[in-house]
Image (cartoon, rainbow, N blue to C red):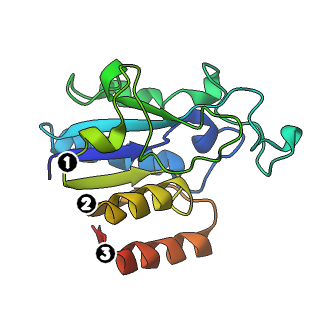
Amino acid sequence: MKQLIIIDCQHDFIDGTLACHDASLAVENIINYCHEHPAMEVMYSLDWHKPTNHSFKINGGIWPVHCVQNEWGSQLDERFDSLNERQKPQVSNKFYKGQVDEVEEYSAFYAKNEEGEVLNDVSDSHVMIAGIASEFCVMETIRELINDNKKVTVLKSGLGYVDPEGHMKALAEYEALGAKIV
C-alpha cells in the first residue's frame, strides 16, 4: 500500500461550521503517520461548494453553510504544509467534490483535481483512508472503493466524526464491508 487518501480535512469540519469530534487530533495523527511513511503518496479530497449549494439549510438542505469555494472554511488545515514535497497539498493531489449544486456528493470516488483527473482513476488497488467525517464522506468513499474491488485500510486514529455512537457504527460497517482498520 503506497497511497493515503485524506478525506475533507478542511477548516469547516475541524473548527468551523460543521466542526467534528477529534478532527484536529485526527489531522495531527495523519500528519504523524505521513512523517513516519515519507514515501507514501498522499491525495486530498475537498468538499467544494458554491454559495448556492442545495445541501445548505439556507437553500432548502439540511447542513449549515460549509466549505464554500475559496473561503477560509474550505481550505485544508495548514499543518499539511509541513509534509514533504511528495505529500503536501498541491494542484495534482487535491481532488474536489460537491461542486454541482443539485447533487449531494459525500464520496470522493469521482472527485476531480484541477487537471481533470478523477480520484478513483489515479488511486491504487489498495489504499489507506483517513479524514472527516467517519459516518459520512469517509464512509461513502470506502463503500465506493470497495464496490470497485479496491482494498481499503482505515487509519482509525486519523478519523474525525460527527457523533461518537455513529462513529462506532461506522467502524463496524467498514469492517463488514471488508476494510481493515489499523
- Asked whether, in this view, residue 15 is left or right of residue 25, the answer is right
- Residue in the image at 78% along x and 41% along y: 56
- Residue in the image at 41% along x and 47% along y: 109
Identity, as a three-letter code, of the amino acid under mark 1: Asp
Label located before the other in sequence (1 or 2): 1
Q: Tag 1's secondary structure?
A: loop
Q: Which mark is residue 124?
A: 1
Q: How far apart are labels 1 and 2 at the CA level?
A: 8 Å
Identity, as a three-letter code, of the amino acid under mark 3: Gly
**Position of 161 relative to 93 (above/below):** below
- Asked whether, in this view, residue 125 is left or right of residue 19, the answer is left
Q: How far apart are labels 1 and 3 at the CA level?
A: 17 Å
Q: How many marks?
A: 3
Q: Nearer the viewer, residue 145 or 33?
A: 145
Mark 2 and mark 1 in contact (Cβ < 8 Å)? yes
Mark 3 and mark 1 in contact (Cβ < 8 Å)? no
Reading the image, the residue beneath label 2 is: 150
Q: How far apart are labels 3 and 2 at the CA level?
A: 10 Å
x then y, percent, for residue 77:
48, 31
x then y, percent, for residue 86:
20, 27
- Asked whether, in this view, residue 20 is left or right of residue 126, the answer is right
Assess disc 3: are there few (<14), some (14-19) or many (≥20) residues with their C-alpha within 10 Å of its C-alpha: some
Identity, as a three-letter code, of the amino acid under mark 2: Lys
Tag in front: 3 or 2: 2
Reading the image, the residue beneath label 3 is: 178
Label located before the other in sequence (3 or 2): 2
**Position of 69 relative to 67 (above/below):** above
